[in-house]
Amino acid sequence: MAERGEISTAQNAQVDVTSEIRSFWDTDAATYDDSPSHYPRRPQEQAAWAAALRRLLPPPPARVLDVGAGTGFLSLLLAGQGYQVTALDLAPAMLARLRAKAADRKLDVETVEGDALHPPAGEFRAVVERHLTWTLPDPAAALTTWHAAAPQGRLVLIEGSWSSRGSSPGDLLRMHARRIASQIRGAEPGHHGHYSERMNAALPYRGGITPGEAVALVQASPWGPARIERLRDVEWALTEGRGQLDALLGTHPRWAVIAGD
């Protein structure tokens, strides 16, 4: 059994890493939306994402918790469809940008500053996240707290396959070709920097989570049995109208893991 001092040291280390992660994303807020993959702006992409959310979630006006909401891509799409949205994020600068967008669009989105392990009180009808799992030091604990926030609700994890782990030979070939094409074109705007070694060491899915890992993670949690859906409509919208090369190379697979009612 671990001694009290050892537990305290581990908890303090996790708090320190969480603070470092908060600082990273707080700084990243200034340029985060410059990347089309972070905040898609083309109408066909926004429409595809909106349709996917409506398909995956209970109908509006369900109360939805958007965890790791960032600058508000999902939250604003949900609010625009009549959902009651609470946006949770640990980075205040991210939430400030979300609030500014919501005000410009005259949309009502509640914002809460906090980490994924501490969702706001109140019973939600659904919990949704997009590309958050890899940033969490303890995703299993997060899933448990999210279930407590929506005990009779639905979980929707929206993720993508960004690394070579678990990819098919065809996907690996296209991934390599996309990297070459990106180098020739010049990389799109991305993050302001990179995670430190200490931050990466604290993240069990720092290289990206695979569909199998995501399903296993959810099924081991209080959410129980999970199902998975490939978001091919979103993938199509991401490459539509961009030219023959993009249509041929495609994009990273997007998928959702769903559990609960």
Image (cartoon, grey):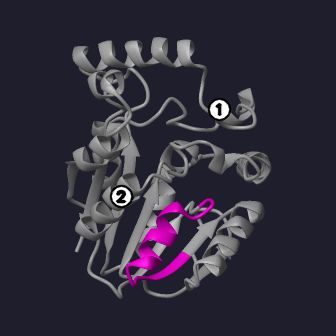
Please state the extent of the stretch shown in magenta in the rendering.
Answer: 70-86
Q: Quadrant of residue 244?
A: top left
Residue 138, percent from left and from top: 55, 50
Label 1 SS: helix
Q: In which quarter of the image is residue 143?
A: bottom left
Q: Name the residue under label 1.
A: 200
**Mark 2 burial class by Cα count in 10 Å: few <14, some 14-19, many 20+:** many
Query: Foreground: 203 or 244?
Result: 244
Residue lying at 77% horizontally and 62% vertically, measured from the top left: 93
User: In the image, which disc is placed on residue 39?
Assistant: none
Tell me which amino acid carries mark 1.
Asn
Q: Is residue 80 magenta?
A: yes
Label 2 SS: helix
Up the image or down, 60 lies above or below 214; here it is: below
Q: Which label's residue is closer to the chain start, 2 or 1?
A: 2
Residue lying at 58% horizontally and 45% vertically, measured from the top left: 135
Q: Distance between the residues labelled 2 and 1?
A: 29 Å
Judge whether residue 47 can be spotted in this image. yes
Tally the marks: 2
Residue lying at 35% horizontally and 65% vertically, measured from the top left: 50
Judge whether residue 222 can be spotted in this image. no
Residue 126, percent from left and from top: 37, 75
Q: Mark 2 points at which residue?
A: 49
Q: What is the quadrant of the C terminus in the image?
A: bottom left
Residue lying at 35% horizontally and 48% vertically, measured from the top left: 217
Tell me which amino acid carries mark 2.
Trp
Looking at the image, residue 154 sits to the left or right of residue 12; the answer is: left
Up the image or down, 80 lies above or below 191; here it is: below
